[in-house]
Image (cartoon, rainbow, N blue to C red):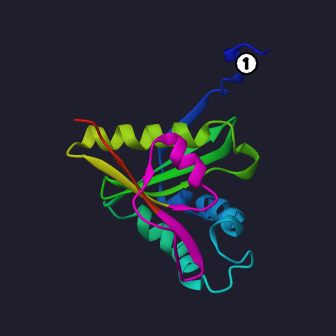
Amino acid sequence: MKPLSEFALPAWTLRPALVADAPAIVALIDDLMPFLTLHPDGAGAEKFIEHCSLPAIETYLSQDKYRYQIAHLDGELAGVVAMRENTHLFHMFVPRALHRRGIALRLWQAARDAALARGEVTAFTVNSSLYALPVYTRIGFVPTGPKVEQGGIAFVPMQMTLAG
């Protein structure tokens, strides 16, 4: 059996995302889109897809109510995480090649810690894709309602209440 240290991720960098990062973020989301929409070709999810387009991501990145962070691992994009209004996990995406390596957890921890540092947080929410549901459950989110299907996507509303 491998020692735990062999499972550790290599060093990564995490920084606030800039509007200039929008094309890379959009490319990452586009590659993952088949996991996010009800139909792999995106049929029926045009509005959702539009909200993940370059103009939309550039707009989010330029607004104070969104806090994006971008991670790099060995010089390559390793993920992106965004909070809206300091309490809603708005976006969290990791490239397919890096799934199941603990990066989503590290992204969440960074976003959570930054939100807590800004203060006045009693709970976090997320609308989890069905694909990401196990990840959010492991992180500590719990469903707050049944699966919702609308606009070509399906998600489960979830929440993490902070002890306090």
- Residue found at x 44% / y 51%: 142
Figure quadrant of residue 72: top right
What residue span does the magenta drawing correspond to? 128-156
- Give the residue number, with chain letter if any, for mark 1: 6
Q: Position of residue 82 (x, y in %)?
A: 45, 54
Q: Position of residue 43 (x, y in %)?
A: 68, 85
**Count of labels in the image:** 1
Q: Position of residue 66 (x, y in %)?
A: 37, 59
Most foreground residue, 29 or 59: 29
Figure quadrant of residue 157: bottom left
Secondary structure under badge 1?
helix
- Residue found at x 66% / y 28%: 9
> Farthest residue toward the right?
1
Residue 111 appears in the picture as rendered: yes
Amino acid type assigned to the residue bearing label 1 in the image: Glu
Q: Residues within 10 Å of mark 1 (few under 14, many from 20)?
A: few
Q: Position of residue 87 (x, y in %)?
A: 32, 53
Q: Is residue 142 left or right of residue 164?
A: right
Q: Does 149 appear in magenta? A: yes
- Residue found at x 64% / y 59%: 131
Residue 53 appears in the picture as rendered: no
Most foreground residue, 47 or 129: 129
- Residue found at x 60% / y 32%: 12
